Image (cartoon, helix red, strand yellow):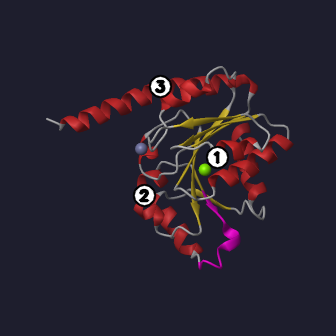
Amino acid sequence: MQPRILQIQQSVLSKNDELARGLRDRFTAAGVTTINVVSSPGSGKTLLLTKTIERLVARGYRVATLVGDLATDNDARRLAEAGAPVRQIVTGGNCHLEAHMIEEYLGDWDLKDYDFLFIENVGNLVCPSSYDLGEDFRIVILSVTEGEDKPLKYPPMFNSADLAVITKIDIAEAVEFNRDAAHASIQSVRPGMTILEVSAKTGEGVDVWVDTLIKRHEGT
Ligand code: MG
Ligand code: ZN
């Protein structure tokens, strides 16, 4: 017999998976590309998303964002400056987003009005890996300040992602970032995964990243 705690966890997860399936069907029917962005705290997720949204909006795409945070709405306020609707999910201490939160916070948004829905997950590389939010793509972000072996320490998160983005490459040299080691760690956990390198601050790599998103949206 399984320990009770494990049984409970499995039933919570299967309930989440069921809701996530429903969300995925809604996203597909509406033609909105949904992107779940996961990382450690302080990886530069919010800044990258802000720059990404600005560029997508400038190119005529319609974007909405849900952002999860433990306690504050600082990130939501920063993201709103990019010129697209944002809703904050304050999780009240919950260290990950779950499908029911996405369903609740989508509220009255008509998904047909959007091309992209970004979900900025809570900064955490552990449990967000277990919670499907109905997304089309899961993006894992790693900054050059974090240590090249991070993917080896959090394999489920890197293994469940579709694409990895290395951020803050403008300071890579200053922090003695070992690019080859970082790429090797990612590839050992998720062989063949596409890895992009960006600096939201200088703009380096951001167009390639935005083009990648647009190609995925267009299904090419
Ligand atoms: Mg953030
Ligand atoms: Zn959690």
Is disc 2 placed on a helix, strand or loop?
A: loop
Q: Position of residue 184 (x, y in %)?
A: 51, 69
Query: Dot 3 corresponds to which residue?
Result: 19
Is disc 3 placed on a helix, strand or loop?
A: helix
Q: In front here: 132 or 188?
A: 132
Number of the front mark, 3 or 1: 1
Disc 1, ligand 1: is the CB inside 8 Å? yes
- Callout 1 amino acid: Asp
Mark 1 / mark 2, whichever is N-terminal: 1
Mark 3 / mark 2, whichever is N-terminal: 3
Going by the image, does 65 lie left or right of 113? left
Which image quadrant shows ligand 2?
top left
Q: Position of residue 168 (x, y in %)?
A: 66, 65
Q: Position of residue 26 (x, y in %)?
A: 60, 23
Query: Dot 2 corresponds to which residue?
Result: 154
Q: Which region of the structure is painted magenta?
A: 165-176
Mark seen at residue 7: none
Instruction: State whether residue 209 is above or below residue 214.
Output: below
Is disc 1 placed on a helix, strand or loop?
A: helix
Write the residue at 47% across / 25% down: 19
Query: Dot 1 corresponds to which residue?
Result: 75
